[in-house]
Amino acid sequence: MTTNTDNAPLLTRYNSYADGFGDVLATLTAEAWSNPSPCDGWTARDVVAHVVDTQRDFFTRHDVDLGPAPSFDDPVAAWRAHRDAVSARLADPTIADRAFDGHFGPTTIGETLVRFYGFDMIAHRWDIAAAAGLDHRFTDDQLTEMETAADGFGDALYSEGVCERVDVPAGADRQTTLLARLGRRAVLR
């Protein structure tokens, strides 16, 4: 494991994921936040709360205070406040470079946030857009990143409460295939 002496690349990657997530949130109407998402039992608002809460929980487990939790009355504002708090912590190398033994071996807070929670921020973009009836398409780079991450997660991807196994429909395009791997049923293109 290497330690970052310059956190700019790590911070840039986190902000890229967070900004992409925020861009999708900004497309929703006020009425769409209570729509059911593809995540069973969750609304679009619940998906945002999940992304924020899991990141906050991660930081809490590593004794990093993100400040007060945002209110989800306005999910876009809640996301912005959360993103700003996380970015400020990642800019601090004493936090971003803090080492620990993770699920897949030695890592740092920053690397875990980018690799695992970055994956989450990409995947849940589709869930939120789908809740609003929008067609969100991943870029080829995002598809490659998510496919690589899913391969790395192995069977842990199908642990309780993570993703369910869904058959890949015949004739599925790359995105539909990935979404099926992530337990989501998408309309074939």
Image (cartoon, rainbow, N blue to C red):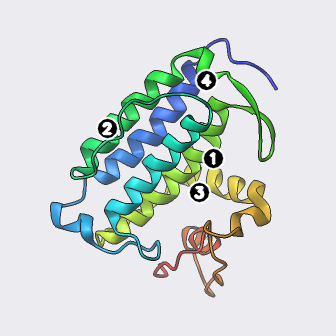
Between 88 and 168, the residue placed more toward the observer is: 88
Say which of marks 3 and 4 sits in front: 4
Q: CA distance from mark 3 to mark 4?
A: 26 Å
Q: Secondary structure at mark 4?
A: helix
Question: Which one is nearer the viewer's eye here, 37 or 173?
Answer: 37
Which residue corresponds to the image point at 62% horizontal and 32% vertical from the top-left?
62
Which sits earlier in the primary sequence, circle 4 or circle 2? 2
Q: Look at the numbered disc 3 and give the secondary structure of its residue.
A: helix
Give the class, few, some or many, for how many residues have Cα within 10 Å of label 4's Cα (few <14, many ≥20): many
Which numbered tag is attached to residue 180? none
Is 155 placed above or below 5 here? Answer: below
Which residue corresponds to mark 2?
80
Counting from the top left corner in percent of width and height, residue 108 is at: 70, 30
Callout 4 touching callout 2 (CB < 8 Å):
no
Q: Nearer the viewer, mark 3 or mark 1?
A: 1
Label 1 close to label 2 by CB (< 8 Å): no
Q: Amino acid at mark 3?
A: Leu
In-image side of 39 versus 72 (left or right): right
How far apart in space, not on screen, are marks 1 and 2 (Cα)?
A: 20 Å
Marks 4/1: CA–CA distance: 14 Å
- Mark toward the viewer: 2 or 3: 2
For mark 1, what is the residue?
116
The residue carrying mark 4 is 96
The three-letter amino acid code for the residue at tag 2 is Arg
Circles 3 and 1 in contact, beta carbons < 8 Å: no
Mark 1 surroundings within 10 Å by alpha-carbon count, few (fewer than 14), some (14 through 19), many (20 or more): some
Report if the CB atoms under discs 2 and 3 are less than 8 Å apart: no
Q: Would residue 116 be found to the left or right of residue 42 on screen?
A: right
Inspect the image, locate mark 1, and give the three-letter code of the amino acid beneath it: Phe
